[in-house]
Image (tube, rainbow, N blue to C red):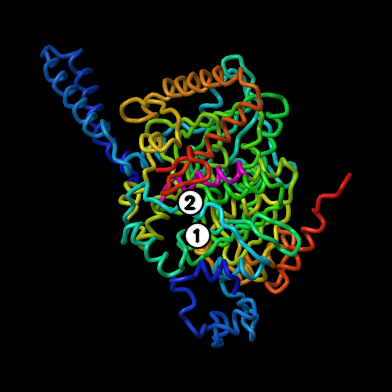
Amino acid sequence: MPEWLSNRRNGRTQDVAVWSKCPNCGEVVYRRDLAANSFVCPRCKYHFRMSAYDRIASLIDGEFVEIGADIAPSDPLGWVDRRSYPDKLAADREKSGLIEAVVCGFGNIGEFEVGLGVMDFHFRGGTMGSVVGERIALLLEESLRRSVPCIVFTASGGARMEEGMLALAQMAKTSAAVSRFGAAGNLFVTVLTDPTTGGVSASFAFQSDVVIAESRAVIGFAGRRVIEQTIRQKLPDQFQTAEFLLEKGAIDMVVERQNVKATLTRLLEYAKPVAR
Amino acid sequence: MSNNVIVERERGLVELERRIAEIRAANATQPVDMSAEIAALETKYRTIQNEVFGSLTPWEKVNMARHPSRPTALEYIERLDRFDELHGDRQFRDDPSIVGGFALLHGRPVMAIGQQRGRDTKENLQRNFGMPAPEGYRKVRRLAALASRLSVPIVTLVDTKGADPGITSEEHAQSEAIAMCLHEFTIARVPIIATVIGEGGSGGALALAIADRVLMLEHSIYSVASPEGCAAILWSDAGKAEEAAQRLKLTAQDLQQFGIVDDIVPEPLGGAHRDTDAVITRVWSTVSAALTLLAPLPPAELLDRRYDKYRALGQWQGRSLDPVAGAS
């Protein structure tokens, strides 16, 4: 484990579980073996939902310096449903070791410095509230300032309802930041992981230059249940999978997790600035 | 029976209105003077009207925003000096839930784009209840890009439960269509004024509402999710929609405080449908005044201001790299 990651994890409750059960085939896998296999089930190739820091560790060579890490969610609406929003945030903080659903920062993938944002479904279902939007915007602005490519891994149930319209407004904020970044001519890549839906799917996830999806990830605008209720019939299993979207022409490529870093590296090579 | 609480409440008033009219008619032909009784009934009418509509709860506003008689986008657009509708996404089909084209507003060329729900069952089916498909959003993007190129300001009318959640819409990449609409509105080099006239439902509404000025009618709503959807997910009980509406802060008045909405256009007591002409006139003069203020700005400054406006939205704790941005 790199030093930045062990520092980050000190005192956190991460990695308590020793064994993980595959949600797809039921195989019970030793956690360390699973990590060594990029969190892909050795039996059925099911891609486990990865934590943000595991993902970053799997991609970044050397140091990873975070940006926007010092901002944390507040409770603008004073939200309460069956639990209060601050209670939910505290529980997710405990569970995931994160203070928000995205981690952003800078580091190297091979020889290339990149801005990297990684969403984590274990925190509020990866939903986008003010902090997620702000961190993504900061990442894009700082990537622009440094003239480096930007890569964002998405995993999200959409806009975070507990922050109301301020959450929806983050779709506008991130869109504006992507537009500015893109106008300056650098490469923006999104890697859509399971699941990527709603307000994240309908904003920066699909505004990138190259849209990659991890194998079998569920990707869509409306949730499966909503569609099934609307049409009153069951949807086929393949509906809204990465493979389905590839066939429909919505994404550029479907990549197995073990090949994601190599794929990103090749894209970074094409986009490398050349002396003119 | 309507399941709309506003429609239900109007029944009592309509009954009272009918009685007042009857007595008036009778009073004109009969020897007994009943003007005192008429005055009493009218006072009662105004009292009830004030009680019923004087201050609406968020849930009542949700119902007002969905009122079957509430003026729709086309009623606004038809009131412009001129309108030449442009159709289609140039790729697959024309989506009737989006209406757009060149128009003249107080003599000024504009690109008017609205979400159109049906005014009756037949039109609702034709227009998919105002829920745009990807083709609709691609039409919006096309028209916005055209307006930007020709330096024609964009005015939008937002009124949708949300983007269409069907199989075909997913197959045609609804997410991408909305995402690219948002993108286009962040780069359009002309003033954009968005007005929420009814229901502003989630990302499907925002796709027409990244704007230099966002207006809302007094009793319209704008929400991250429908109260019913929010209740189903967060309470696991769709019956909690009224409570969800209260919590979501989806009224124009709440959203102005969060900086989401710039201006509120007043409605007559009882809602926009009680005096459609007055409301439409008021909306267009507010939009026109906003355009007049924005017109002198060079495009680069307009875009910078729009960027800063959206960049500042949000609330969090702690320091950001940008100390002015929205920290609470």
Amino acid at the residue labelled 2: Val
Chain under disc 2:
A
- Which image quarter: residue A3? bottom right
Q: What is the x, y in percent for residue B57? A: 29, 40
Chain ID for label 1?
Answer: A
Reply yes or no: does residue A171 show up in magenta: yes
Q: Residue at x 43, y 43 (%)?
A: B327
Tell me the SS state at disc 2.
Answer: helix
**Is residue B175 placed above or below A194 in the rendered structure?**
above
Q: Could you tell me residue B294's position as x and y percent?
A: 57, 21
The answer to whether residue A194 shows anywhere in this view is yes
Which residue is located at x 65 percent, y 59 percent? A107
Say whether residue B166 is visible: no
Amino acid type, label 1 = Ala
**Residue B196, image x, y percentages:** 47, 34
Q: Earlier in the sequence, mark 2 or mark 1?
A: 1
Q: Which residue is mark 2?
A: A131
* Residue closest to the eye, B95 or B42: B95
In the rendered structure, find residue A275 and report the number of the disc placed on it: none
Range covered by the magenta-colored residues: A163-177
Q: How many numbered tags mark residues here?
A: 2
The front one of B166 and B182 is: B182
Residue A171 placement, left or right of B314? right
Q: Quadrant of the C terminus of chain B?
A: top left
Percent coordinates x, y for residue A177 in the rendering: 61, 43
Task: Answer above or below: position of A176 versus B218.
Answer: below
Q: Which mark is residue A101?
A: 1
Majority secondary structure of magenta residues: helix
Q: Residue at x 66, y 24 (%)?
A: B152
Mark 2 and mark 1 residues within 8 Å of each other at the beta carbon: yes
